[in-house]
Amino acid sequence: MDVTRRSVLKRTLGGAALGALAGCLNEPDETSGTDGGYASFFALWDWATQIAGDEMVFENPVDTGEMGHGWEPDGNLVPEIASSEVFLYLDTPEFAWAQDIVADLERDYEDEIVVVDGLEGMDPYLIPFDGDSESLPEPDHEHGFDPESISRDLFDFYDLRSNDQLGYWHIDHWHGGVPDVPVDDSVPISAAFRDQEERVVPLGPNEEFQFDARLADTAPTDVLDIASHGDSVELIGLETGETEIIFQLRHDGELVYETDAAPMSVDVVAEVDEAGAGVFHDPHVWVDPVLASRVVDTIADGLAEVDPENAELFAENAAAYKERLDEVDQQFEALVENAERDVAVFVAHDSYRYVERRYGFELHTPVGVAPDAAESLEDISDMIDIVEKHDIDTILYDPFETPGEDVLPTAAEMLIENSSATDAEPLSPAEGTTHEWAEQEWGWVEQMEEVNIPSLEKALGAE
């Protein structure tokens, strides 16, 4: 459980407060449970509802038809939230209103309420807003590499959770290091090896070259385990302590080079103390089904703290729901495998960067991560160029950024009028729900399967 910006406040049963807000997404039904709480936007509300089952009822204060990102409450929600048992939110300035409520709960209320930050432990996976950090470069699959041509004096290594560079090896020593590895969790590491012409070597189980690692000769064997995947190694925490590892480059399984001149120190810790997203990180982790699974686990742990007697039920419900998230992940993988192109145009704020990074395609957006930014004529011109260059016929738009029901955003209309694109399809960041989707009882999974994946199939030519 995250303790950042939360106090342990004495909680009271909050059934009477639930459903007090007009226009909320869910009115409490007759259930076997009497407890409940609030979630700061649609995705968290849906996941909490799936995990809680009949034991808790959750309220989402964001009106149907609106998205939680950039939303502000009309009145003071603090007393109503304080009278419930649990508040689910993301500790990021992009949901500043929820941060303010948590601060008010800490300051003004003595009764306990459990506050759960869905971004707990997510720091290593977060994408910087500015995009300036060095990312794992694309390999050159067109060139045949001789093992003798590959530089051993210099290579970079990366944390695959965020795709950020951690440091580099130089001749016989390291610059940088790997993050702490939590017990019963793992840290995936990859590397970029180059030849004398600065071409990046493809790595993988089906490639000629593989990235690998081993424990140092004198290192303890009960602290860390290493799983090799060819293109990366997974450092798995077994028990707390310090150990040392040696990275390796292999050619068709045979050792080419290793960093035994200076083994790298790795700490395995009981818990990594991570803060929220912060002002410089993209908060849209909930769009990625793999990262969504981590948020679901965090919510299940939070509900277990509220109601320990039903902890096993919450864990079972979370596990069942994560199987549905795995299915969405597989559908994204199949989509990209069948796609004709890896570029599409998304007329909206840049909410899909985590999905783009995971599955290897690009959604060109006219503005950045903030939902209230407006595109310029130059942005429109750039999108037209991309449409023409990649022969794109379907434009994507955010249904929560339209001027009205069944009305396309102005930028989408301009693209259809001034480019070869002939169609526009919705792509939801799952920050809210529409009246139509709510009537069909669509949750996060249904938005992905019924709306987003079909739209991406059209935009990327994967139908």
Image: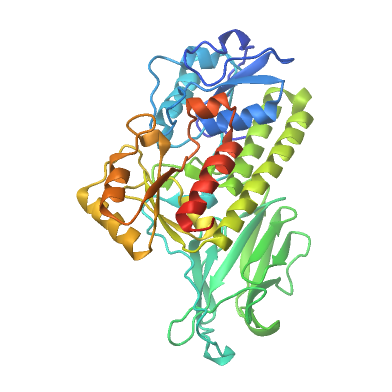
Residues 460 and 195: in front is 460
Q: Residue at 68% of width from left, 51% of height from top?
A: 185
* Residue 462 image position (x, y, % from top left): 53, 58
Residues 189 and 397: in front is 397
Q: Quadrant of residue 76?
A: top left
- Residue 271 shown left or right of residue 154 in the figure: right
Q: Is residue 297 above or below residue 237?
A: above
* Residue 90 image position (x, y, % from top left): 50, 34
Can you see residue 248?
Answer: no
Locate the N terminus by quadrant.
top right
Locate the C terminus by quadrant.
bottom right
* Residue 327 image position (x, y, % from top left): 67, 47
Q: Is residue 107 above or below residue 358?
A: above
Q: Quadrant of residue 48?
A: top right
- Residue 346 shown left or right of residue 458 in the figure: left
Q: How many marks?
A: 0
Residues 259 and 367: in front is 367
* Residue 328 image position (x, y, % from top left): 62, 47
Q: Residue at 66% of width from left, 72% of height from top?
A: 230
Q: Is residue 183 above or below residue 318?
A: below
Can you see residue 442?
Answer: yes
Q: Residue at 74% of width from left, 59% of height from top?
A: 223
